[in-house]
């Protein structure tokens, strides 16, 4: 996935969660609950795409988080 799409997903994912929770908690009609569940499912799908990106999160080594410095055993 391109970096632009990853940035977009990183912005959309929390917005979907917040909007879904707000719609589900604030209103108690069947269609608002359905919309809230749909937004939550979209949140989960976006999160899966962010985590499972082959060139992204799962491809990094644990040592890269420290600026590339290797830890002594």
Image: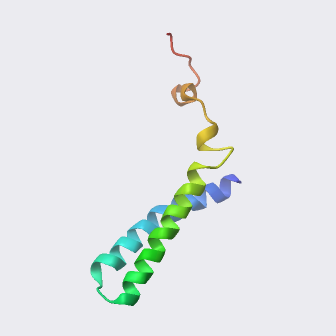
Quick check: 30 left or right of 5?
left
Q: With 26 as the anchor, is 51 left or right in this view?
A: right
Question: Residue 63 location in percent, x, y?
Answer: 55, 25
Pick out the residue farthest to the right: 2
Please tell me whether residue 17 is drawn above or below residue 51 in the rendered image: below
Q: Tell me where residue 53 appears, x and y as whole percent.
A: 64, 49
Q: In this view, does 60 lie to the left or right of 19?
A: right
How is colour applied across the structure in the image?
Answer: rainbow
Judged from this view, the residue extending furthest toward the top is 73
Indicate whether 1 appears above or below 15: above
Image quadrant holding the N terminus, namely bottom right
Residue in the image at 51% along x and 15% along y: 71
Which image quadrant for residue 28?
bottom left
- Please report the residue visible at 45 percent of the width from the left and 67 percent of the height from the top: 15
**Image label count:** 0
- In the displayed structure, would residue 10 be above or below residue 37? above
Residue 45 drawn at (x, y percent): 55, 63
The residue depicted at 67 percent of the width and 52 percent of the height is 3
Q: Quadrant of residue 36?
A: bottom left
Foreground residue among 21 and 11:
21
Image location (x, y in percent) of residue 51: 56, 49
Please name the residue shown 56% across and 19% down the image: 69
């Amino acid at each position: 996935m391109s970096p632009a799409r990853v940035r977009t997903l990183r912005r959309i994912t929390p917005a979907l969660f917040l909007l879904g929770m707000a719609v589900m908690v604030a209103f108690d009609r069947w269609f608002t609950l359905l919309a809230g569940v749909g937004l939550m499912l979209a949140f989960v799908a976006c999160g899966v795409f962010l985590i499972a990106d082959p060139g992204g999160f799962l491809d990094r080594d644990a040592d890269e988080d420290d600026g590339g410095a290797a830890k002594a055993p």
